Image (tube, rainbow, N blue to C red):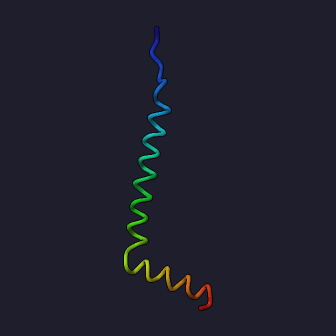
Amino acid sequence: MPRGEAGMTTAEYAVGTVAAVAFAALLLVVVKSGPVKGALTSIIVSALGT
């Protein structure tokens, strides 16, 4: 009875999901940093014209 790779697809999805969550966490840390947060705030304020 040959052994297949039945669980590989699920494992690949799990690794991809973990990588996506790690990237999102890193992006959140960068966006919440002082200089980036200030730059984004100034862009939004100037776009709204207030």
Side of 47 where 38 appears, left or right = left
Residue 36, image x, y percentages: 43, 77
Determine the residue located farthest toward the bottom in the rendered image: 50
Which residue appears at 46% of the width and 12% of the height? Answer: 2
Above or below for 21 versus 39? above
Which residue appears at 40% of the width and 59% of the height? Answer: 25
Above or below for 3 versus 25? above
Determine the residue located farthest toward the top in the rendered image: 1
Residue 3, image x, y percentages: 45, 15
Q: Quadrant of the C terminus?
A: bottom right
Which residue appears at 44% of the width and 40% of the height? Answer: 14
Side of 42 where 28 appears, left or right = left
Residue 12, image x, y percentages: 46, 37
Above or below for 12 versus 25? above
Side of 48 where 7 appears, left or right = left
Count the numbered circles shown. Answer: 0
Residue 35, image x, y percentages: 39, 81
Front residue of 20 and 3: 20
Side of 48 where 19 appears, left or right = left
Above or below for 6 versus 22? above
Determine the residue located farthest toward the front in the rendered image: 50
Which residue appears at 39% of the width and 62% of the height? Answer: 26
